[in-house]
Image (cartoon, rainbow, N blue to C red):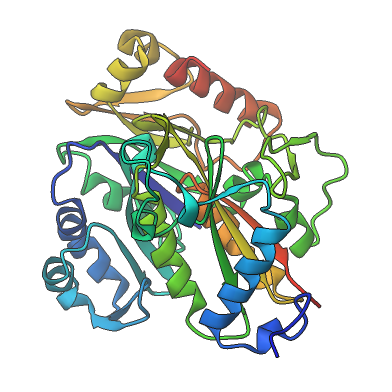
């Protein structure tokens, strides 16, 4: 049985956890945003291939969001996040020719806010707005 | 700690390898044989980092050594590279040669030495930072971060803080008691070099393509009084802000 309402979602392995939380947020927090998997290429009238947006999950106006889940009790997440933010900061992303505002939305396990908070300053230096929220619990 | 921030323009080619190569002699002084790749967690010999960067065609790096870090990366939206050396230099005297190893590099834009804690809180906008560190923020001015739901948050308004920094196209609007600014940057922001040289309270030395500025006798650590006035004046002269 899949976890419901975020309960026990943090017991899943990371990839499944990420998918579960993204699906939940697509239907709730991000219901008014475009999911980049569904964007239509105006030149072809067909959906973009999903790998056109490897680091972006949602878009609204000139705001683009990369959604990540982190269990700060695990190992290696600092390295993974630095790598991800490096990719994000070095990518030129525009919406209708306008440079996008890059936002990294991080969902952490209950109690994980303090450990992840150092990413806020790291992101700001790299022109990435980092928002951290606890999920579930 | 005396933190270091250096900005390079897009004219810098093979930036990661070149910058590391320029720093290596100075970094040897920290007597660390091994370092950590901060992107992967992999341990590398200090002497092997250059080859590692070349072999992996790294455009950026995050090297952890001696409880600090050397971070080089490209900020695409602002069209510059930034180098940050954090928690390594414990004095101005240690920080200065690290910067001076790089100022004649083509593409050098600006550098500054700053106090880590002062800079951190002058630029802290997210209330999360205050709350996790249990730092009082009730008295600070607030504003919306301007983002749509679900990202809307109230943040601290730092727009009047003397120690604030702002990422601009091609440079960082930031001040430090010890700064190096290229004449390229002065041209970019439309600063009259002579006006800067004539300000009595700044010691300005012309190094050729770069001006070295000593605006105070120690890193700025206060946002009030004489230090605030000095920071505001420096910002006004350098960035017309």
Determine if residue B133 is in view.
no
Q: Is residue B75 shown above or below A87?
A: above
Relative depth, front residue between B94 and A55:
A55
Q: Is residue B137 shown above or below B27?
A: above
Relative depth, front residue between B13 and B221:
B13
Q: Residue at 58% across / 46% down in the picture?
A: B119
Q: Which quarter of the picture shows residue B52?
A: bottom left
| Side (left or right) of B20 relative to B142 | left
| Side (left or right) of B162 relative to A99 | right
Instruction: Name, please, the residue furthest toward the front.
Output: A45
| Side (left or right) of B12 relative to A66 | left
Q: Is residue A95 shown above or below B236?
A: below
Residue B64 x, y percent position in the rendering: 37, 72
Q: Which quarter of the picture shows residue B109?
A: top left
Residue B111 x, y percent position in the rendering: 35, 39
Q: Residue at 16% across / 38% down in the picture?
A: B104
Q: Residue at 71% across / 63% down in the picture?
A: A133
Relative depth, front residue between B130 and B5:
B130
Q: Is residue B166 shown above or below B94?
A: above
């Amino acid at each position: 049985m899949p976890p419901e309402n975020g309960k026990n979602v943090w017991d899943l392995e990371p990839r499944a956890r990420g998918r579960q939380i993204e699906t939940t947020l697509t239907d709730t927090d991000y219901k008014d945003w475009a999911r980049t998997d569904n964007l239509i290429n105006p030149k072809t009238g067909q959906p973009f291939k999903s790998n056109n947006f490897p680091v972006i999950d949602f878009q609204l106006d000139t705001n683009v969001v990369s959604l990540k889940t982190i269990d700060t009790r695990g190992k290696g997440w600092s390295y993974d996040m630095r790598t991800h933010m490096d990719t994000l900061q070095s990518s030129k992303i525009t919406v209708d020719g306008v440079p996008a505002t890059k936002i990294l939305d991080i969902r952490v396990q209950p109690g994980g806010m303090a450990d992840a908070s150092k990413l806020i300053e790291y992101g700001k230096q790299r022109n990435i707005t980092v928002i951290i929220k606890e999920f579930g619990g | 700690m005396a933190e270091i921030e250096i900005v390079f323009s897009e004219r810098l080619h093979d930036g990661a390898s070149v910058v590391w190569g320029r720093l290596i002699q100075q970094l040897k002084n920290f007597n660390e044989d091994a370092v950590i790749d901060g992107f992967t967690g992999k341990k590398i010999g200090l002497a092997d980092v250059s080859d590692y960067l070349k072999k992996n065609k790294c455009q950026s790096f995050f090297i952890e050594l001696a409880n600090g870090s050397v971070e080089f990366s490209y900020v695409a939206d602002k069209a510059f590279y930034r180098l940050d050396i954090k928690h390594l230099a414990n004095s101005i005297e240690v920080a200065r040669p690290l910067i001076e190893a790089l100022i004649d590099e083509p593409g050098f834009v600006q550098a500054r030495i700053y106090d880590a804690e002062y800079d951190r809180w002058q630029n802290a906008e997210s209330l999360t930072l205050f709350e996790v560190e249990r730092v009082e923020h009730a008295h600070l001015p607030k504003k919306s971060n301007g983002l749509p739901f679900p990202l809307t948050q109230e943040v601290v308004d730092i727009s009047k803080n003397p120690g604030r920094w702002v990422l601009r196209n091609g440079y960082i609007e930031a001040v430090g008691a010890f700064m190096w600014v290229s004449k390229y940057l002065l041209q970019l922001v439309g600063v009259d070099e002579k006006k800067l040289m004539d300000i009595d309270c700044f010691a300005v030395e012309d190094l050729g393509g770069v001006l070295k500025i000593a605006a105070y006798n120690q890193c700025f650590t206060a946002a009030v009084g004489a230090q605030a006035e000095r920071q505001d004046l420096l910002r006004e002269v350098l960035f017309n802000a």
